[in-house]
Amino acid sequence: MSGYPLKSFSLQISILTLFLAAPEFAAAQAGGPQKVRIPPPAAKAKPKTDRSTLPPIPVFKDIAKEISVTVQHIAAPEARYVIDSTSGGSGLFDCDDDGRLDIVLVNGSTVDRLREGGDPMVTLYHQEPDGTFKDITKEAGLTRKGWGMGVAVADYDNDGKLDLFVTGYTSSVLYHNLGNCKFEDVTEKAGVRGSGFMTGAAWGDYDRDGYVDLFVSRYSHLDLNNLPQFGSNKFCRYKGILVQCGPWGLEGESDFLYHNRGDGTFEEVSVKAGVHDDIGYYGLGVMWVDYDDDGWIDLLVANVGRL
Ligand SMILES: [Ca+2]
Ligand SMILES: [Ca+2]
Ligand SMILES: [Ca+2]
Ligand SMILES: [Ca+2]
């Protein structure tokens, strides 16, 4: 490894020498013995930096405390397992149609806490008229406990009110918005509980039937009763240091695509739709986007190591 910088330096010297010699050589060929200096290529025009006609560049300030958004994401600081490193998410939506955006934040958990049932998967903050926020999680009915991973908002039943889907380890949850930021847990009825290590989620009407469908990515297979132990094999060491295991060396998991039947229930169709992920990549972020403007939304899944 130590020879690399030296080789690289030698190569640069060689190229530089050739570049300096080339104009002289060209001049000798074209103009006989008289040496003609060849001008260097014109420099590329610099981009305009005059911003006098543009608004000032925005500067951001952390105002979370000022507006009372103070919930702490729950996580084990020692991060002994890969699941300790994947949770976290946020959403902005107007849950009571008062014209002000409300905030939903994903909570996470720890292995020990999950064995006792876990933690409320999200915290919901209502935006008050003065611009501060109030924690309304309990009165909103967002009480499902577990290990929250991500969140996606959409009006899945076309009643005009935005609903909430939260991914989680072993169980996700779908909350139907009843109005005024009151929610009903409809996970079982809708058939979107899922299983395994669910991380990303995105709503999109992929078949254009007027009802949004739901894609859920999954990460790796992880058995809570048989967790790979810190530093226990070659995938859990980095340059001799013992580290958490995964995702390399862990079995990946397939993904889910839930087709919205339009009656409040969903059908898992990932195999017939061709998005099952048989290889089992370690899936994280997801988005629907019509990248080629053909009118049909396409699916982008960010996996660890590759798209
Ligand atoms: Ca609101
Ligand atoms: Ca709705
Ligand atoms: Ca649809
Ligand atoms: Ca498309």
Image: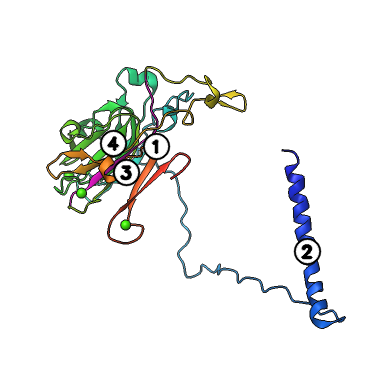
Figure coloring: rainbow
* Residue at 37%, 17% in the rendered image: 225
Kind of residue at badge 4: Val
* Residue at 34%, 21% in the rendered image: 114
Which one is earlier in the sequence, the residue at label 4 or at label 2? 2
Q: CA distance from mark 2 to mark 3?
A: 52 Å
Residue 127 visible within the image = no
Kind of residue at badge 3: Val
Q: Nearer the viewer, mark 1 or mark 2?
A: 1
Tell me the residue that label 1 is attached to: 279
Magenta segment range? 210-224
Residue 17, given in percent of the width and then of the height, sits at: 80, 62
Q: Is residue 52 magenta?
A: no
Which one is earlier in the sequence, the residue at label 2 or at label 3? 2
Kind of residue at badge 2: Leu
Q: Are marks 3 and 1 in contact (CB under 8 Å)?
A: no
**Residue farthest right in this picture:** 33
Other-residue count near label 3 (Cα within 10 Å), few / some / many at <14 / 14–19 / ≥20 = some
Tell me the residue that label 3 is attached to: 275
Please say if 289 is above or below 37. Answer: above
Tell me the residue that label 4 is attached to: 166
Residue 296, given in percent of the width and then of the height, sits at: 28, 56
Please say if 69 is above or below 98. Answer: above
Image quadrant where residue 15 sits: bottom right
Q: CA distance from mark 1 to mark 2?
A: 49 Å
